[in-house]
Structure formats: C-alpha cells, structure tokens
Amino acid sequence: MDKNLQGIEFLQEGNVEKAVQMFTEAIEENPQDAVGYVNFANVLISVGELQRAEQFLKRAIEIDDQASAAYYSYGNLFFNKELYDKAAGMFEKALAIGPESNDLQYMLGMCFVNLGRNELSLPYLQRSVELNGDDMEARFQYALSLARCSVYEETIKQLETVIEAESDHADALYNLGVAYIAHHNDVKKAQKYFKKALEIQPNHLLAGNGMKLVEQLSEEKGQ
C-alpha cells in the first residue's frame, strides 16, 4: 500500500507516531511529491505544531503550486491561529484550483463568520449544506447566518432539520426558540425549546436567560 495512504489510516486510528513514520518515509522516497509534505503538515497541525507545519506546506507549494490540498491545509493552519483573513485567502486559492468540497465551503464560510462578514459567509455555508446535507454542523451554522439576516422562516426550517437529526443539540433548540419569538412572537413554542435545551444542558446560560424572558412575557400577557 502507498505509504501516504498507510499514514492516513494510522492517523484516523489515532496512531500519530506510525502516521509520522509513514509520511516521513513517503517524503524520503519521493521528495518531489507534494502529497507527503501536506500529510506531514496535517499531522503537525493536529498536534498544534503550527510553525513546523507551515514549513512543510511552503515546501509542498514550492513543489506544486497547484496543490489544492496544501492551500486547504494552510487555511486550516491560519484558522487555528485565528488569522481568519489569511485563512480565507488560502481557502479561496484551494477552491479556485478545485475540487469543490463541503468542508472547503464550510471553512470559508466560518472565516467570514469570525470576521463579522455575515453577508459573505451565507453563500459559502449554503453551498456547504447543498454539497453534504448530512453535515449538521454546517447546517446549524448556515441557520445562524440566516438568522443574522433576519430570514427567520428558513432559519426555523434549517434548525428543525438539525434537531430531527440530533435531538440533543441544545444550541439548535435554543436558537429555534429565539427564532420563534423573533418571527412569530410565539412565546409558548419558544418556552418549549428553551426548556428542552436546559433539560439537555442545564448550565446553558442563554437558554436559561431565554426562559426568564418568556416567563416575564407570559406574566405581562396575563396581567
């Protein structure tokens, strides 16, 4: 078996030491193949050795400036360092080269979320969901971006899909409650979702504050 593939298998099994060994041998045997450098960099990123990882990614791009995986990994490196503008630049390069993927679109969207550019995050997160409808984290983040744009009907639809797949998603339940108040002024439904969120995560501060708010609104309506 190809040593890069063996290394990936070891990495997926959590055997970092064997993965490093395989990627090292892959580089030694094929020093002009960018793949080994990218894989080694991914291991280093996973253990937080970002400075060393960057050297391997620079080498990969020197060898092959069309190595999409190298730009993607470079984007992850910058994202981990909270350098979201630089991360977005790398992800955009990876996207321009291709292939397009759900993960790539998601990471680009999350760069713009962290940069406070919701209008830019929305299309990337939407595309991520289109590419992989089973990715509930991408769908959840897409729903939050929709909510920031006050597109509440679609927000509710997306959050309900998340909860159907992951009934214990406390953050989705909380945000669904918020959406029902914001869009329908439906205090009872909001209260139901806040309560569910707190049953799953009793220390969910936002859901706790939401419960206090709906209780206050209910009292005011009763007066």
Image: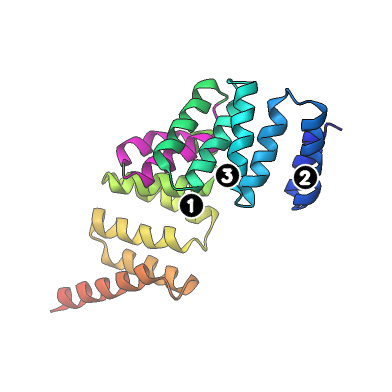
Q: Mark 1 against mark 3, which lies toward the viewer?
A: 3
- Badge 1 marks a residue whose secondary structure is helix
Left or right side of 63 for 6: right
Q: Mark 2 against mark 3, which lies toward the viewer?
A: 3
Q: Which residues are magenta?
A: 100-127
- State the image quarter where residue 61 is shown: top right
Residue at 40% in and 72% down: 195
What is the basis of the colouring in this image?
A: rainbow
Q: Is residue 115 magenta?
A: yes
Q: Earlier in the sequence, mark 2 or mark 3?
A: 2
Which residue carries the number 2 mark?
Answer: 19
Q: Earlier in the sequence, mark 1 or mark 3?
A: 3
**Circles 1 and 3 in contact, beta carbons < 8 Å:** no
Residue at 29% in and 44% down: 151
* Type of the residue with mark 1: Val
Q: Is residue 31 magenta?
A: no
* Type of the residue with mark 3: Gln
Q: Which mark is residue 162?
A: 1
- State the image quarter where residue 100 is shown: top right
Relative to residue 148, is residue 24 depicted above or below?
Answer: above
Specify few, some or many for label 2: CA neighbours under 10 Å numbering under 14, 14-19, or 20 or more. Answer: many
* Type of the residue with mark 2: Ala
Left or right side of 79 for 209: left
Residue at 72% in and 32% down: 36
Q: Which mark is residue 51?
A: 3
Q: CA distance from mark 2 to mark 1?
A: 34 Å
